Amino acid sequence: MMYDHGVAGTTLDDVLAASETGKSQLYHYFSDKSDLVEAVIARQLERVLAAQPRLAHIDSLEDIDAWAAEIVRNHEQPGGPFSCPLGSLAAELKNDAAFVPTLNAAFRRWEQPLEQGLRRMIDRGELDVATDPAAAAATLIASLQGGMLIARIAGDVQPLRDTLDAAVAALRRRAT
């Protein structure tokens, strides 16, 4: 609901009506709307990670290529390009200090499998030791987010493809 209507556009009464629950049930799990938003951020991160099963198996530049290609394919589906549920929340909540730490942690969690895979590639001598795996992982996710945004606005997946291709090409230039 918050993905479709935004956090500001979703009231607790809307949540109660959609879930067909009473206030006592809602307040049993969430003390206020902020608690609910925190849970929504966590759930959206789960959705993002579940939609990218290749992340769990990043061990080479070819794996990163396959991950990026799969994302592009998913956005070529009818109705695409799509918005990122986590990115949409981040855009809406970026100025709310209460949620920024949770959003930062969610994006770091998303970057972790990429960072770990890049670190293994460095350890095996496949990438230049000067490569910062955390920065490279953050760059990949930032490219994905920016590409998704522009693709969504353009109604064309090409900007997403281009940004991911550029980010992967930058990594390939660090291959040894």
Image (tube, rainbow, N blue to C red):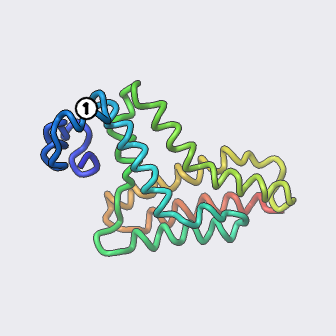
Asked which secondary structure carries label 1, the reply is: helix
| Of 12 and 136, the residue lying toward us | 12
* Mark 1 residue crowding within 10 angstroms, few (<14) / some (14–19) / many (20+): few
Compared to residue 94, the image places residue 86 above or below, namely: below
Outermost residue toward the top in this view: 97
Residue at image x 78%, y 59%?
A: 121
Tell me: 20 left or right of 62.
left
Quadrant housing residue 54: bottom right
Residue 42, percent from left and from top: 43, 44
- The three-letter code of the residue at mark 1 reads Tyr
Q: Quadrant of residue 149?
A: bottom left
Q: Quadrant of the C terminus?
A: bottom right
Left/right of residue 65 with respect to residue 36 in the rendered view: right
Residue 116 is situated, as x and y percent measured from the top left of the image, at: 70, 52
At x 39% / y 25%, what residue is drawn?
A: 98
Q: Is residue 127 above or below residue 99?
A: below
Residue occupying image coordinates x 28% and y 33%:
28
Name the image quarter holding residue 2. Answer: top left
| Residue carrying label 1 | 27
Please give the name of the residue rendered at 13% of the width and 38% of the height, measured from the top-left corner. Answer: 13
Farthest right residue?
A: 125
In the image, residue 105 lies at what x, y percent? 53, 38
Is 54 positioned to the left or the right of 90 in the image? right
- Please name whichever residue, 145 or 11, is drawn nearer the observer in this view of the structure: 11
Which is more toward the observer, 53 or 157? Answer: 53
* Residue 77, percent from left and from top: 36, 74
